[in-house]
């Protein structure tokens, strides 16, 4: 078994939902002398910090195609506030009318429910306020406007000396700083480095028609697309939501999809669907699809194709974490960097409910770092990674769609709750466990969201799932009757 010993100081990179959860679970172990979270933004909340149209200043730097993770850390946009102070903004993918696609009853942290009077699918502003309130009792551990630029392994072989050197910039002063820590938790997220595939002709098309191709990260509202022919590439939640918004402003919205969405496919009759794009043709701004059909005079192409795993501040690791951008390497259970397990990651999985996943992972990390839990051997952790790759390709490595995400949360719960209890320090913070009702809600939430969308603007008045006809207790009674009656 791998035992992580002598950890007294922990750095957390990022103070979004995952980073703040990490601080809380680490603090609850009552054994660390120093816990410091480094957040590059001016406030907690991560990507839930809305940056408005300032994000468009970055579009000129967007390389097309974009298939490799960034080699350097993201640089902020400097903006002067109404009071005359300079602030540093990092473009967020949040757009004007974004609301969650997860019911807040499932989305929230275990110890902080969303306000009862908020919509079942809250707008981003409500989520942002929720995250700020969640962090209120740990703000002394958070260093805002502090951008981590490099994390290096210490050259010391002394187990009683810090193992990680962390270099960062204090963005409020421009001062370069360095500190040492025994362990590092990477909670920087993976919604900052856009992925745009290398489709034949795309480079030539972009050179001939600059600005036509963009990524959903830079989308803010549908007004610029009024009466334009718009191609949305991808049918993820963001692709479906953006296409739904734009189709209210133009009759020419086409969604190009690899495979038909099984969740939130728009039922708008004004949206046309096409297969994958086979080729970009600069002449007449033309797209050719794999079925041979073509669209000419295309005005805008928005790639809703997700993001790459990118950790440029970890570029000096001998065994790299991110090379292709499709997944991380040398990571056990989507958490521990097994060549040196004093480095851990949060919320690498996709197709999940992120806040509870962050809590479940943070509980495991905190107990390992405090010495109350041991990890499997190096060979066993490496074998776990190989085992996943035998059942999933590289791109799907971190996909934990239902029911895998529920099973993952509950597996981590049982692991964490098996930790020995220290009489002087307590049992730590209890992670989430998803019971039958949570599991049922997780299974149903795409349909719940679809039912809400059919209400149009009135969906904002929905406060609970029963308002939409989804009642767990009623479902359970029906299932019980079915079992009594039999086949």
Image: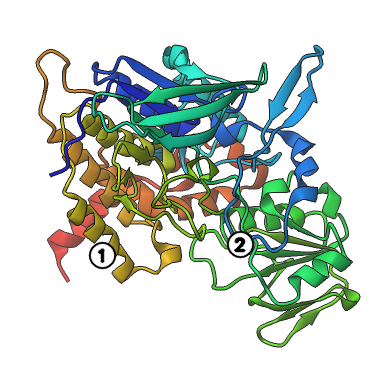
Query: Looking at the image, which is closer to me, 317 or 248?
Result: 317
Q: Which of the two residues, 51 or 186, is positioned nearer the viewer here?
A: 186
Q: Quadrant of residue 73?
A: top right
Q: Classify mark 1: residues with Cα within 10 Å, few (<14), some (14-19) or many (20+).
A: few
Residue 67, label in figure: 2
- For the image, the number of numbered tags is 2
Give the colour scheme of this rendering. Answer: rainbow
Can residue 15 be seen in this snapshot? no
Q: Are marks 1 and 2 in contact (CB under 8 Å)?
A: no
Cα separation between marks 1 and 2: 26 Å
- On the image, the x and y values in percent for residue 53 come to 78, 38
Q: Quadrant of the N terminus?
A: top left
Residue 120 falls left or right of residue 399: right
Is the residue marked by circle 2 packed among few (<14), some (14-19), or many (20+) residues within 10 Å? Answer: some
Is 310 left or right of 419, judged from the image as shown? right
Disc 2 on helix, strand or loop?
A: loop
Residue 167, percent across and down?
A: 52, 28
Residue 251 percent across, percent down from the top left: 82, 64
Q: Position of residue 262 (x, y in %)?
A: 48, 65
Q: Earlier in the sequence, mark 1 or mark 2?
A: 2
The extreme bottom residue here reads 292
In the figure, residue 301 lies in which quadrant? bottom right
Res 387 label: 1
Is label 1 in a helix, a strand or a loop?
Answer: helix
């Amino acid at each position: 078994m791998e035992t992580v010993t002598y950890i007294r100081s922990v750095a957390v990179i990022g103070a979004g939902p995952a980073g703040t959860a990490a601080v809380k679970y680490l603090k609850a172990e009552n054994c660390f002398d120093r816990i410091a979270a480094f957040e590059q933004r001016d406030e907690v909340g991560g990507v839930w910090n809305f940056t408005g149209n300032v994000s468009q200043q970055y579009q000129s730097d967007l390389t097309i195609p974009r298939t490799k993770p960034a080699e350097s850390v993201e640089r902020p946009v400097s903006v002067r506030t109404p009071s005359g102070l300079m602030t540093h903004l990092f473009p967020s993918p949040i757009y004007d009318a974004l609301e969650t696609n997860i019911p807040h009853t499932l989305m929230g942290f275990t110890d902080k429910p969303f306000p009862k009077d908020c919509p079942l699918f809250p707008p981003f502003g409500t989520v942002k306020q929720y995250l700020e309130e969640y962090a209120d009792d740990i703000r002394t551990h958070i260093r805002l406007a502090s951008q981590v630029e490099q994390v290096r392994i210490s050259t010391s072989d002394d187990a009683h000396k810090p193992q990680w050197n962390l270099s960062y910039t204090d963005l409020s002063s421009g001062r370069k700083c360095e500190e040492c820590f025994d362990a590092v938790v990477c909670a920087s997220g993976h919604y900052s480095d856009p992925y745009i595939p290398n489709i034949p002709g795309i480079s030539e098309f972009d050179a001939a028609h600059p600005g036509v191709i963009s990524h959903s990260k830079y989308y803010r509202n549908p007004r610029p697309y009024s009466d334009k022919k718009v191609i949305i590439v991808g049918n993820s939640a963001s692709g479906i939501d953006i296409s739904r918004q734009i189709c209210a402003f133009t009759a020419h919205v086409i969604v190009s999809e690899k495979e038909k969405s099984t969740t939130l496919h728009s039922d708008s009759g004004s949206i046309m669907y096409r297969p994958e794009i086979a080729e970009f043709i600069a002449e007449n701004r033309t797209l050719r699809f794999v079925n041979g059909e073509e669209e000419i005079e295309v005005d805008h192409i928005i790639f809703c194709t997700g993001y790459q795993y990118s950790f440029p501040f970890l570029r000096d690791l001998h065994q790299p974490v991110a090379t292709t951008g499709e997944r991380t390497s040398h990571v056990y259970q989507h958490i521990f960097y097994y060549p040196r397990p004093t480095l851990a990651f949060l919320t690498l999985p996709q197709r999940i409910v992120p806040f509870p996943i962050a809590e479940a992972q943070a509980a495991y990390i905190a107990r390992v770092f405090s010495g109350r839990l041991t990890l499997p051997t190096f060979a066993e952790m490496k074998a776990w990674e190989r085992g996943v790759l035998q059942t999933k390709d590289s791109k799907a490595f971190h996909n934990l769609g239902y029911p895998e995400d529920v099973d993952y949360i509950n597996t981590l719960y049982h692991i964490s709750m098996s930790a020995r209890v220290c009489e002087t320090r307590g049992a730590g913070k209890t992670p989430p466990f998803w019971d039958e009702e949570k599991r049922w809600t997780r299974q149903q939430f795409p349909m719940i969201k679809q039912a809400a969308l059919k209400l149009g603007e009135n969906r904002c008045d929905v406060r609970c799932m029963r308002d939409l006809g989804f009642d767990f207790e009623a479902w359970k009674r029906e299932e019980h009757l079915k079992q009594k009656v039999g086949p």
